[in-house]
Amino acid sequence: MTTTTALILLALALAIVAGLAAYAFTLWREVKRREAFREEELRRAHENCLANLEIVASSLLQEQVDVTEGAWRCKLLLDILDPRLLERPDFQAFSEVYSRTQHLHTHSARKALAPRDRMREDRQRLEIEAEWRQPVLKAAEEVLRFRRGWPDSLH
């Protein structure tokens, strides 16, 4: 192999390595961009959940929404934020009401029920609401405290 051939191969190898390095750098920047985008999306999703959670909790405390509906909505929003939040004693009332009323029909399925069945389900729902009203209202107050302390209150 001549010196000229060796130099050409060396230059070619350096060009390939430089090209691969540039490509790797481009990929690294794209990964960083996507991570930043994902983090921003998550932050916005959390902000939306927190705003909705605050509205629902306030509506519960002002009795603008039924205990069952408010508990369901708070449970689902807390679950979106972090499922471990529902394990906190302050928020367990939401999960309890949800689990006790989960079998009840809603929307069009409720309308399709016979009047007697609808009345039976209403009676069950009202009994659960009477039993869990105070714990759910206390949990709604805790939600508002949680919201004020966000994000430090998360963990």
Image (cartoon, rainbow, N blue to C red):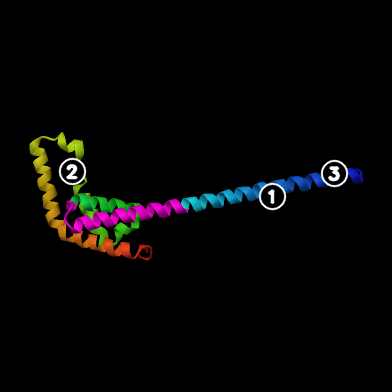
Q: Is residue 113 above or below residue 68?
A: above
Q: Is residue 114 above or below residue 65?
A: above
Is disc 2 in contact with disc 1, using a CB cutoff of under 8 Å? Answer: no
Nearest to N terminus: mark 1 or mark 3: 3
Instruction: Pick the quarter of the image with the C terminus.
Output: bottom left
Nearest to N terminus: mark 2 or mark 1: 1
Which residue is disc 1 drawn over?
A: 21
Q: Nearer the viewer, mark 3 or mark 2?
A: 3
Q: Which residues are magenta?
A: 39-67
Instruction: Pick the quarter of the image with the N terminus.
Output: top right
- State the predominant SS element of the stretch in magenta: helix
x and y, in percent, of residue 93 in the image: 22, 58
Within-10-Å neighbours for mark 3: few <14, some 14–19, many 20+ = few
Closest to the observer, 34 or 136: 34
Three-letter amino acid code of the residue under disc 1: Ala
Q: Label 2, label 1: how many angstroms apart (C-alpha)?
A: 60 Å
Is disc 3 in contact with disc 2, using a CB cutoff of under 8 Å? Answer: no
x and y, in percent, of residue 57 in the image: 24, 57
Q: Which residue appears at 9% of the width and 43% of the height?
A: 120
As helix, strand or loop, the secondary structure at mark 1 comes to helix
Q: Which residue appears at 30% of the width and 59% of the height?
A: 87
Instruction: Name the mark on residue 8.
Output: 3
Within-10-Å neighbours for mark 2: few <14, some 14–19, many 20+ = some
55 magenta-colored: yes
Q: Which residue appears at 12% of the width and 47% of the height?
A: 124
Within-10-Å neighbours for mark 1: few <14, some 14–19, many 20+ = few
Q: Label 3, label 2: how many angstroms apart (C-alpha)?
A: 78 Å
